[in-house]
Image (spheres, rainbow, N blue to C red):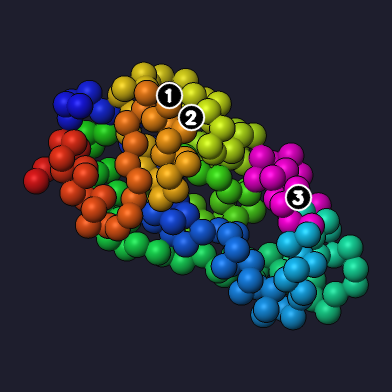
Amino acid sequence: MASGSIRLLLWDCGGVLLTNGWDHRERAAVLQQLSLDAAEFEQHHPEANDLWERDAIGVEEYLQRTVFYAPRSFTPQQFLAAMQAQSAVLHAENLRLAQELAAAGRHTLALLNNEARALNDHRIAAFGLKKIFSSFFSSCYLGLRKPEPTIYQRALDIAQCAPQEALFIDDRNENVEAAQALGIRAIQMISPAQLRSDLQQLGVLAA
């Protein structure tokens, strides 16, 4: 694909730029910190999390379903703060790369990620992502989740971009394959060095 035909760069966030917001490692850390039974929590998590990431329920109901159905020695606000504290920069090199591409002004950069609103809004603000990305096609805003084809198509429709004009970057193969099935060029991010090299090969970055 010629570099000039790519105008929209769609980035995943957790696993590419930042740590995951509320994946199994983050959940395990918070549950251990607050002395909660992990197996019991995980019985309640999947269904509630799917609704939460689609913004069908808010953080209060998610926590009620997964944690506060029984008396606890901490508050929902304290639990949410512990969740948010799990977020950190995962690949500083990838953040710098995104900043470099945004500063060059040749492409539109947007996030396409699965995240619940209470965590997504926190991460956007805490890590200055609005300085890099012009749009946020997050599951909590669209009511859709990767790898559902509709979330990719919705992002293309809102951006008024043809599939062949978009490039998607994600660390998970199933999400990459879903984008490719719609005709979107996609890169599975294995390492920052590999991502930079792949972008150079596509002509998105100068070699």
Q: Left or right? Give the position of 103 relative to 68.
A: left
Tell me if residue 41 comes above or below residue 190 in the rendering. below
- In contact (CB < 8 Å): disc 2 and disc 1: yes
Q: Which residue is mark 3?
A: 48
Measuring 83% from the left and 56% from the top, which residue is drawn there? Answer: 65
Which span of residues is magenta-colored? Answer: 44-61
Q: Amino acid at mark 2?
A: Tyr
Which structural element holds mark 3? helix
- In contact (CB < 8 Å): disc 2 and disc 3: no
Q: Earlier in the sequence, mark 1 or mark 3?
A: 3
Secondary structure mostly taken by the magenta-highlighted segment of the chain:
helix
Which structural element holds mark 1? loop
Nearest to the eye among marks 2 and 1: give it.
1
The x, y position of residue 134, in whole percent, is 40, 38
Q: Which residue is mark 2?
A: 152
Which structural element holds mark 2? helix
Report the quarter where the N terminus lies. Answer: top left
Whether residue 134 appears in this view of the structure is no
Q: Which residue is mark 1?
A: 182
- Separation of disc 2 and disc 3 at Cα? 23 Å
